[in-house]
Image (spheres, rainbow, N blue to C red):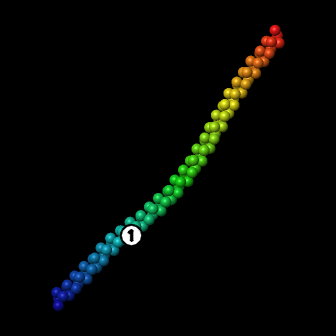
Amino acid sequence: MYTERAKKDAIQNAAQVSDLLVDAVNSGVQESFINEKRIEHEIRALAVTISRFMKLTNQWLTATRAINTAVKEIGDFENWMKTMEFDCKSITAAIQNIHQA
């Protein structure tokens, strides 16, 4: 009877230890699962932020290219004006030479 009781107690204690071990392992698994979900959420948020950043970067690149083109056109116009001024001065000098001769 005593050994039967000890055997039942041992089985009951082993079951309790087993339950505690399973609970300990499960809580670690549950914590890992929660962390995985948080990481996935952060990855999605980061992907959205990166997408917005890429769109803004492309807009800035487009604006910068437009400014560069405008600056080049201003430079071309300025160069054309200098050429026209030189040509006008040359023509004026030629007309004055003809007129004085």
Tell me which amino acid carries mark 1. Answer: Gln
Answer with left or right where residue 98 lies relative to residue 11.
Answer: right
Asked if 65 appears above or below 34 in the picture, the reply is above
Answer with left or right where residue 38 lies relative to residue 76.
Answer: left
Residue, x 66% and y 37% (percent of image)? 70
Answer with left or right where residue 9 lies relative to residue 52.
Answer: left
Asked if 63 appears above or below 51 in the picture, the reply is above
The C terminus - image quarter: top right
Report the front residue among 27 and 81.
81
Residue, x 73% and y 23% (percent of image)? 85
Q: Estimate the x, y position of residue 94 in percent, counting from the top left.
A: 77, 15
In the picture, residue 2 is in which quadrant?
A: bottom left
Answer with left or right where residue 98 lies relative to residue 23.
Answer: right
Which residue matches tag 1?
30
Q: Estimate the x, y position of residue 90 in percent, counting from the top left.
A: 74, 18
Report the front residue among 84 and 60.
84
Q: Estimate the x, y position of residue 11 in percent, counting from the top left.
A: 23, 82
Asked if 53 appears above or below 28 in the picture, the reply is above
Q: Residue furthest bottom?
A: 1
Asked if 24 appears above or below 53 in the picture, the reply is below
In the picture, residue 97 is in which quadrant?
A: top right
Which SS class for mark 1?
helix
The N terminus - image quarter: bottom left
